[in-house]
Amino acid sequence: MLHRIFIALTSLVVGFSFSYTPVAAAAFTPSETDRIGQLRQEYAALDQTSFNSHNLYAVLPQFKDQFKAGKVVPNYLTAQLDYLNFYRGIFGLAPVSINEEDNQAAQKTAAVLAVLNANPLVNQHNLPHEKRPKLINKAIWHLAKVTSNQANLNFNTANQSAGAVITDLLTDRYNLSGADTGHRAWLLSTRLTATGFGAAYGKNGCRYSVQKVINPADTFHPASQEQVAYPSGDVFPLELLQNNKIAWSLYLSDRDFDSIPLITITDEDTNSTYQAKDVKNYSNAGYGNFQTIITYSPNQTPLIAGHEYRIQVGDLATYRVKLFSLTK
């Protein structure tokens, strides 16, 4: 199966366009209230440190007379893994571990991208538009080409936290290729077991972030659950939907579906039904080792904290989700 991952450009700031109403405690059952409290507590405990070129490195990279990839500070790696597993937990997915060999490969790849000052506006997987600088030997160059093709790539000029990078990949709102949600699918893979992270700054001020997500052995692992829907779960953070560039999605681990389903979203509190638009099937891409990948826009559906929504994806699935604010 051919795997492709697309670049998320994160140097833009986009305003939220969906409607928002503060959470009303009466809108949630006791079990939902407990779950919301747990998620808010876990989220508040995540590392919010903003990183820049001065506090990112434990060992500075060298790009002048010789190439050395350097090392990022340990809490950068820990924070990225913590955010990843926090988000996976929202979907009922098991946590993944961090792999030191993957960290090293990701760091070297990020450093190569930084040396190149690689254009963040084009696909950099497999470095198709770049030539090997003399500073970088053939072995490192080959490693960077392979790893970049097995990774989520995120480029930004903002002093983001380590977790904000993961959030950008999860929402996939800066995906250069559109609404395929390939980054999200790898983060929420029902077969993913391990990952690795790296980051480096180029002279252009861009932070090149690399997360290795394709492990060949994962393809043969049994899926941990049949489907992953975004949004889904008993309760779901409104903040992960508040942007008109955030596509919604349904992934099926082992079931093949090659058509375009009719998708409706019903607000159970107002009894209003909306038809999704821009429904696309990206199943052939194989993102996240899923057999079926459906993405769509919720169209004009008003998103209101405390409201419950029923989502009907053709004959494939019907599920409900209630929205809440993660930070209120």
Image (cartoon, helix red, strand yellow):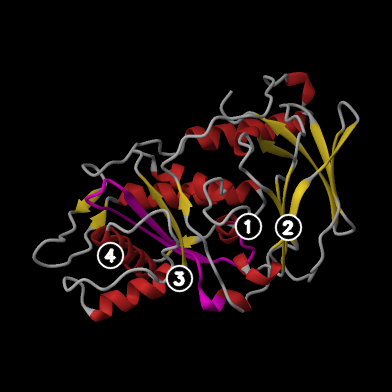
Please name the residue shown 69% across and 25% down the image: 19
Q: Which residue is mark 2?
A: 280
219 or 249: nearer the eye? 249
Labels 3 and 4: the sequence-earlier one: 4
15 or 200: nearer the eye? 15
User: Which quadrant of the figure has residue 280?
Assistant: bottom right
Residue 84 in the image, given as x and y percentages of width and height? 51, 51
Please name the residue shown 21% across and 77% down the image: 137
Residue 87 in the image, given as x and y percentages of width and height? 57, 47
Residue 178 in the image, given as x and y percentages of width and height? 59, 53
Q: Is residue 249 magenta?
A: no
Q: Marks 2 and 1: CB-CB under 8 Å?
A: yes
Classify mark 4: helix, strand or loop: helix
Foreground disc of the pair 2, 3: 2
The magenta stretch is 188-217
Crowding at label 4, few (<14), some or many (≥20) Cα neighbours within 10 Å? many
Classify mark 1: helix, strand or loop: loop
Q: How far, Cα to Cα, is label 2 from label 1?
A: 8 Å
Q: How far, Cα to Cα, is label 4 from label 2?
A: 34 Å
Q: Which residue is mark 3?
A: 149
Relative to 318, residue 193 above or below: below
Q: How far, Cα to Cα, is label 1 from label 4?
A: 27 Å
Q: Which residue is mark 4?
A: 112
Q: Which residue is mark 1?
A: 180
Crowding at label 1, few (<14), some or many (≥20) Cα neighbours within 10 Å? many
